[in-house]
Amino acid sequence: MEEFKITQAGQWPRLKSIAAEIRDTNFRELLDSERAARYRLEAAGLYLDYSRNLVTDEVVELLAGLARESPLAAHREALFRGETINTTEQRPVLHTALRAAREDLQADGLGELAGKIEAQLTRVREVSERIRAGEWLGVTGKPVRDVVNLGIGGSDLGPKLACEALKEFAHERIRCHFLSNVDGEPIRSTLRGLDPETTLVIVSSKSFTTHETLLNAETAAHWFKDRLGMENPYASPHFIAVTAAPAKAMQAGIPEDRILLFEDWVGGRYSLWSSIGLTIAVTAGHENFLRMLEGARQMDIHFRSEPPVRNMPVILALLGIWYANFLDAESHAVIPYCERLAQLPSYLQQLDMESNGKSVTFSGENVSQATGPIVWGLTGTNSQHSFFQLLHQGTHLVPVDFIGIGEDGLSSPEHHRVLLANMIAQSAALMEGRKSGKLPPWRNFPGNRPSNVLLLDRLAPETFGALIALYEHKVFVQGSLWNINSFDQWGVELGKELAQRLLDDGDDARDFDGGARALLDRLRW
Ligand code: F6P
């Protein structure tokens, strides 16, 4: 991996000096329709308006120059060609291959993967179609009505978001439930409302070692035993596993013909395109799952072919770098104006923070600038009535992504107009602000607060796929310019190990710090 030090790039000093002046620039005055026409992009059914950012043409050009000077283009090719870019785990990163056409793979020298990927997709099709057709029968011969996905992180967030986003296409009889936390209440209360004869559990885990998922699976297995008097529920048609570790699923008792596979070169947080998307195909139908993959592929083609200033993921990434590295913004808010995208902020938290929440470079040196921001958000208009006060008048600089849907067949024209009017008004209010000598200071709005507006023509499988791929590539570009590995997640390990130590041997807890010991005493551990 070619090493790149962003702080030593030719553009860095000039960007630093402009940043010192930029807060005093009144962007409201620059916001004419000519700027709006220049600062917009369209790709794969998405429209990006980035005119309300704290950037001038010079800043955009310098940021684009930074991207050109960096090894981004080579790194991007290495991604698509399946080179070992996840260096700390010695793996390629090939979620893009899951949505590529056979000829794309052949052109990239990955032709041998095509058969494997197609076979896995065929399994998703067969299983989802049998479930949807009422042909997947439980032990008492009744068809499945409720599908319970047990998984956490990437084995939960992507499918859960997609099933909700594609609600318009949802099967009228089958309901999917997503259980992730090891908290025993959600699984108990969900199962209490279900009929075991018509329930199918999908154990979704790339590693098949994740404690939360395996304990939830055990609880579900006990429920089947108690309610249906089954000897071995795992061996019954009430359990399916989706995993990259089939031997572990078989050890747990799930037979090979009920295990759907994916490869270890699919990162957990990039796995909704793989067999992990089974619940998406069950909910919205396999054709719509394929449409989602095609939308992502269109974004891949755009990302791979357009120069930095016309490249939507690159522009979003560069704006994020501008705020994080030059204007000291520590967080980034994502506000979808659509309840079906309510899970998007949680999904993006894992995608962005697990990928770019790093402080050492590829070669293990400490980074010399900030990396990934704290990502947060909530749907509009709900968020307007909770934290928007801080966005408008607080002391933190928080760049915002507003996400809206052009036409929404599931809403009514009246509701939709109100929703979109609010979104546009918020973006304008943040930038324009309002100052008047006649008003007391607490009624003034400083303005000059940046935001992007992303519009999806419709919330269709294709545009949804393109939206997720857009953010995946944005995160990739930032990781590449920051010279960090966006595809490992070693930072999640220590907490897991300590919890295991506590569980394995209570006495070991004596080695923990005084605060932990006091807590354990109070809990009578
Ligand atoms: O602990 C973090 C993590 O490894 C995520 O990266 C992953 O998405 C999640 O746990 C679940 O992992 P698995 O799919 O292997 O159960």
Image (tube, helix red, strand yellow):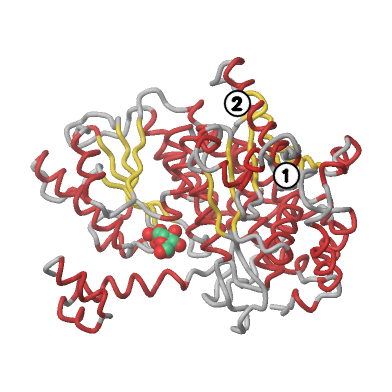
Name the residue located 36 percent from the left edge and 52 percent from the top edge. Answer: 151
User: Foreground residue, 72 or 379?
Assistant: 379
Residue 454 drawn at (x, y percent): 69, 39
Question: In the rendered image, which residue does mark 1 sit on?
Answer: 447
Horizontal relation, residue 327 to residue 290: left or right = right
Q: Three-letter amino acid code at disc 2?
A: Leu
Residue type at mark 1: give it: Gly
Under circle 2, the secondary element is helix
Mark 2 → mark 1, Cα distance in angstroms: 22 Å
Frontmost residue, 499 versus 448: 448
- With 327 as the anchor, is 522 left or right in this view? left
Residue at the (81%, 58%) spot, across then down = 22
Location of the C terminus by quadrant is bottom left
Figure disc tally? 2
Task: Name the image quarter holding the N terminus.
Answer: bottom right
Which is nearer the N-term, disc 2 or disc 1? 2
In the depicted structure, whether residue 317 falls above or below residue 468: below
* 474 vs 282: above or below: below
Q: Which mark is residue 326?
A: none
Q: Which residue is mark 2?
A: 419
Label 2: how many Cα within 10 Å (few below 14, some 14–19, many 20+): some
Residue 105 locus on image (x, y percent): 67, 56
Residue found at x 50% / y 54%: 271
